[in-house]
Structures are given as C-alpha cells and as structure tokens.
Amino acid sequence: MSQSEILMPKMGESVTEATIIKWVKNEGDKVKADETLVEIATDKVDSEIPAPSEGVLVKKLCKEGDIIPVGKAIAIISSDVAGAIDVPKNIPTPEIKKQPVATANTAKVAVSEHSEPISRFSSSGKFYSPLVRSIAKKEGIAVTELESLSGSGKAGRVTKNDILAYLPGRNGSKSAPAQTYTEQPIQQKTMNGSAPKPMAVGPNDEIIEMDRMRKLIADHMVMSKHTSPHVTSYVEADVTNLVLWREKIKSSFEKREGEKITFTPVFIEAVVNAIKELPMVNVSVDGTRIIRHKDINIGMAVALPSGNLIVPVIRNADQKNLLGLTKSVNDLANRARINKLVPDETQGGTFTLTNVGSFGNVMGTPIINQPQVAILATGIIKKKPVVIETPQGDMIGIRHMMFLSLSYDHRVVDGALGGRFVRKVADNLEAFDINRNL
C-alpha cells in the first residue's frame, strides 16, 4: 500500500501560508482524482485542494482554523482503495499556527518560549506580520490588546512603527499588570457625543452573521475612509462611437474568439492612457512619502454570486492591446465568480475601476481601494438628447451618454489633478475610433 503526502500548494510569490477553513473529506473516506479534499483561504481568496489521484484519506495532519505554511504536509492519502485503512502513527505534523483564545480579562504574564503564538489573522480578520507578532510575544501583548491598535499600514495593518509607538505608554515596564483590552465595535456618536443605545432587534428581524470575506471587506472599507480624505469629481462623456463600434463587431468577435466583448476593457484602456499622461494618480502614500508606481496594474471590481466583492488585478495593463485586455478581463471575471482565482491575482493593484453601470446605476462615489489613491466608477450608458456643435450651428441629437466619477485621496491628489484625470479618461472614450479593428 503506497501512501503520499498532500502538501499546502504554492499560491503565488507573495503568499507563504493559508488557513484550513473546511475539510470536505474525513479520515477513511474514498476520494477520486481531482475531487476536493479541503477548502483553504488566504487573506483575500478562498480556494480548494484536490486529491492528486484516487485513494483513501488516511490521516488529516491539521484541523480547521490551523494556519499552514506553503509546502507543508496537511494530509496523508493512500492509493489502496479496497484494503483496510490503518491510520499510520508517528507521522510528523506540519508547523501549525493555532488561533489563540483570549478573554477580556486576560492578564499580562511573563512570556515563555512555549507560549501560544498570535496567529497571522485574528478572528476579526486583521493581519499581523511575523515581525509584529514577534514584538507582541516579546512584550507580552495578548491578542485582545493587539486588536485594539489602529494600523497605519496597507489595508489597516498594524506595522512595526505602530506597535513600537504604542509600547512606551503601555503601563510602564513589562512586569507591570496589564490593562484590560477588549475588542469594541466601531460606534457612531450622537449629536451630544454619547454612544447610541444598542440596536433593538424585533421578533420579525433576522440576524445574519457576516462571513469571512464580508468581514474583510467591511474592515477594508472603514479603514480606507479613516485613512484617506475622499473627494469625488464627475464628468459626462459622449460614448456614441464606442457603443456603435461594439454593436458592429460584437457578433463577429464572439464567433472568432468564443467569448463576448464588453465595455470594460475599453474603459481600462482609456484609464491606462490617462495614467500615462498624468502618472501622479498611479501612486501610493507611505507616511510622508509618495511612491510613484512605474507598473500600471488595474484592479477591476467583480461582484460575486454570494453578494461579496473581489478585485482581481490586470498586471502591466499598459503592455496589453485591446484584445489582450479583453481576454484578461473575461478570464479574471469568470474565474472570480467560480472562486478559482489565486491569491496573487488580487494583489499589487495601483488603480481600480468599478462598473456601477452594470447594475443600472447612473453614477457612484466609490471608496478608494487602499493603498491606492484613486478609483473610477463608470455609470450606465443611456441615450439622451444633447446639444451638438457643428460648423452650421448647434443642433439637438440623440447620443449615448455616461457619467464617470473619480474618487481620490485628497492628501496627494488635488482637485486640479483629479478633475483633469477624469476628464482625460472621458476624452479618450469620446475619441474612440468607430472603424477600429480588433
């Protein structure tokens, strides 16, 4: 009877570990080749690990909630389907990071080398780097106390500077008794500054717990509004040529390529060309430093069947022609909806596009996808009577019009730059060549 280890797969250059969220098969279950064994999650993407061949799941080496490094064994599978199943003993288990259990009155105690570590992701979805976890362990900071810190890093992460700045005012020496830190929800204040009363839940109300992805989205959105002073500028664009062009080529394109062409790749192309002219929109803020990105990596918001949202990224979008952008948009959107993205495909974006027009919305005021500084919303395309200027004078015509709205970080993008950028995107769309080949 041959046995083989199932390893935590590599999911991208920037991903070093993943969380076991659900075992689909139990010990002793027969599995077919490519049948799902376990569901795993990184900070943004959930995925599945399939069985490499037919066999029997002999032993699970980790539990749901464990955080496993890439390349470590998570299970043992046997190729002997018909034979008796003997669970092997003394199998080395992978390096597992357990989710710590902390209570509100957890006291600060001396930390030994055998203390249970703080996990990479807290129960609320907050991320802690290895360095931050190491400092917290050395200083005896419990997970509930760490949860109370506001992070200045990417996606609200607690950085080394955040935790080091917190230490001097923390009850003096290491041996001092700890304060009680509990995780408190963010609450609005009433007009007189007091906290509102708890929300009443009626007998006909339904309470729905947020799933893991919704918690991450909520955290990210609140953090973005706290981080960046948002300003939104609007323009209206005449996209008649674009609409007529798509109507003309969409059938032949679908027959030739086996997929549909939408407006999204054209919007992305217009954004990329605007960034080339106004590169200070393609930046990030790091304290008092502005980081200007040479790569143009465009994130595109995709609504999932669950109602959640994910933003896959088209890397080096400026190096793709319109056909290449169309292929990338369709591929990423389709795989996002069936949960087949890999973690690297949702990271590294420098600018984001969200098409609110796909839901029939005229315009929107999108929230910036940190650590970016701008996000563009494209509204629905509608026929309108508009004034057309001609050499013979003004006339009224029916045109295809749409609103573009750009939300930007007023710390580094002023109204002049934000307004010029969204206007440039509109100009690029209005100048679209109706006779263009694809």
Image: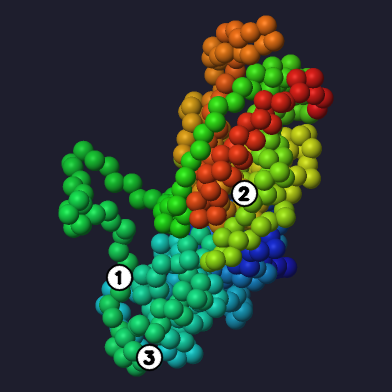
Closest to the observer, 47 or 424: 424
Q: Residues within 10 Å of mark 2 (few under 14, many from 20)?
A: many
Q: Residues within 10 Å of mark 3 (few under 14, many from 20)?
A: some
Percent across and percent down for residue 431 are 71, 26
154 or 238: nearer the eye? 238
Instruction: Work out whether residue 101 can be spotted.
Output: no
Residue highlighted by disc 3: 174
Instruction: Classify mark 2: helix, strand or loop.
Output: helix
Among the two numbered marks 3 and 2 on one chain, the one whose residue lies closer to the N terminus:
3
Return the x and y of residue 193 as percentages of the image width and height: 20, 57
- Please state, as top left, top right, bottom left or bottom right, where the N terminus lies in the image: bottom right
Query: Label 1 belongs to which residue?
Result: 182
Quarter of the image where one finds residue 319: top right
Q: Nearer the viewer, residue 59 or 150?
A: 150
Q: Residue at x 68, y 69 (%)?
A: 71
The vertical placement of 141 against 32, above or below, is below
